[in-house]
Amino acid sequence: MNNIEKLGVDIGGVIIENHNVSADTSFMSKNFLSTPATADAFIELKRLNEGRFKDRVFLVSKCGPSVQSKTRKWLKHNNFYEITGISEDKVHFCLERIEKAEISHSLGLTAFVDDRLEILGYLKHLSDLFLFKPQEAEVEENREHLPLVTVVNSWAELGTLLNR
């Protein structure tokens, strides 16, 4: 049995802020590079990558080719790799939400952070699932998966739980 812990983290809504963002700085606008990072995301990811998960933090995001390109540009523009120590080769994309399960299995992930309860429902084979800043309507649609997850509302809260 492999006891090596590996963390998967969604990007949109978890690392890139999508709550309380103005139209001018929305990731879907022409000013997408100005979209802010979620508060404390970079610092907590650096701590996790250097600490508990020891260079085993992976980003896994569901999006199409255009958003994939924008995401890569945003990560570079915001010095994500330099600040967190997470390398570019640890970024994985898929086109369908359910594909996150296959990616998590192939990477050997043991924990995952996502802002969608539906996706965490596909990842029930992982030992630690964290629902980040959940949206009430999405939770209501996928309520059956709620017992599988720990709900967190900030990176500071998540960092405290994961750095125990």
Image: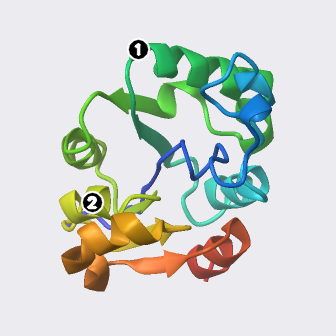
Q: Which of pointers 1 and 2 lies earlier in the amino acid sequence? A: 1
Residue 49 vertical placement versus 96 (above, below): below
Q: Is residue 34 in sight in this rendering?
A: yes
- Image spot of residue 63 (x, y percent): 39, 29
- Image spot of residue 34 (x, y percent): 80, 29
Of the pair 81 and 15, the residue shown nearer to us:
15
Q: Is residue 79 in sight in this rendering?
A: no
In percent of the image, x 58 and y 25: which residue is there? 71
Residue 114: image quadrant is bottom left
On the rendered structure, is 52 left or right of 104? right
Residue 117 vertical placement versus 58 (above, below): below
Three-letter code, disc 1:
Pro
Of the pair 114 and 107, the residue shown nearer to us:
114
- Image spot of residue 5 (x, y percent): 41, 63
Whole-Å distance between the Cαs marked 1 and 2?
A: 22 Å
How packed is label 2: few (under 14 Cα within 10 Å), some, or many (20 or more)?
A: many
Dot 2 corresponds to which residue?
Answer: 118
Residue 85: image quadrant is top right
On the rendered structure, is 28 left or right of 148? right
Q: How is the image coloured?
A: rainbow
Residue 65: image quadrant is top left
Mark 1: secondary structure: helix
Q: Which mark is residue 65?
A: 1
